[in-house]
Image (cartoon, rainbow, N blue to C red):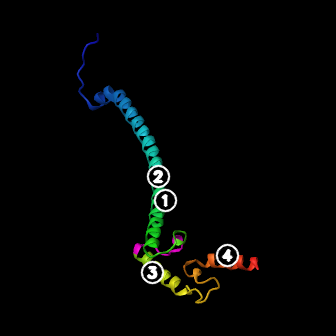
Amino acid sequence: MGEFTPITTQEDFDAAISKRLARQESAIRGEYAESMKELEALRKAAEGHAEQIAALTGERDAAALGLSKVQIAHKYGIDIEDASRLQGSTAEELEADAKAWSERQRSRRTPAPAGSNDGGDNKNKSAKANALAALRELRSK
């Protein structure tokens, strides 16, 4: 083995540890580069998740609005098939529209004719049933 020589100057010290410092610096730079790659991959995954969350949130909101429309339509006696026609984005707006629509529909309904040809049975039938009965009566003549 070689004999120990003490380091007495800064230049001697720098020469003695320069290789070790270079190895450490190289290792740290490599770890940093790997960490940056991992960070970028995580950012891309987070963006994908954010898009998926936005899409699912939109679907959830649309379903909730549809459910609200059906519930409010039922409350105001509007056919379920017509519930999608309600306008508004909040329950209050939907209720106001449903109330107005329900009132318009009631005012548009006309009472059945007072006299009927078959003894008054048609009072409880719908307009469609009345039309069918009249058609049958015409065919039988």
Residue 50 in percent (x, y) is at 45, 54
Q: Earlier in the sequence, mark 3 or mark 1?
A: 1
In this picture, residue 136 sits left or right of residue 84: right
Magenta stretch: includes residue 14: no
The CA span between labels 4 and 2 is 61 Å
Q: Quadrant of the N terminus?
A: top left
Decide: marks 2, 3 in contact (CB < 8 A)?
A: no
Residue 15 in percent (x, y) is at 33, 28
- The mark closer to the camera, 2 or 3, is 3
Q: Earlier in the sequence, mark 1 or mark 2?
A: 2
Packing grade of label 1 (10 A; few <14, some 14-19, many >=20) is few
Give the residue pinned by disc 4.
132
Q: Can the viewer see residue 75 in this picture?
A: yes
In this picture, residue 79 sits left or right of residue 119: left
- The mark closer to the camera, 3 or 4, is 4
Magenta stretch: includes residue 88: yes
The CA span between labels 3 and 4 is 32 Å
Give the residue pinned by disc 1.
59
Relative vertical location of residue 99 with respect to residue 51 in this rendering, above or below: below
Q: Nearer the viewer, residue 20 or 108?
A: 108
Q: Amino acid at mark 3?
A: Lys
The CA span between labels 2 and 3 is 43 Å
Label 2, secondary structure: give it: helix
Relative vertical location of residue 44 with respect to residue 92 in this rendering, above or below: above
Give the residue pinned by disc 3.
99
Q: Amino acid at mark 1?
A: Glu
Label 4, secondary structure: give it: helix
Give the residue pinned by disc 2.
47
Packing grade of label 3 (10 A; few <14, some 14-19, many >=20) is some
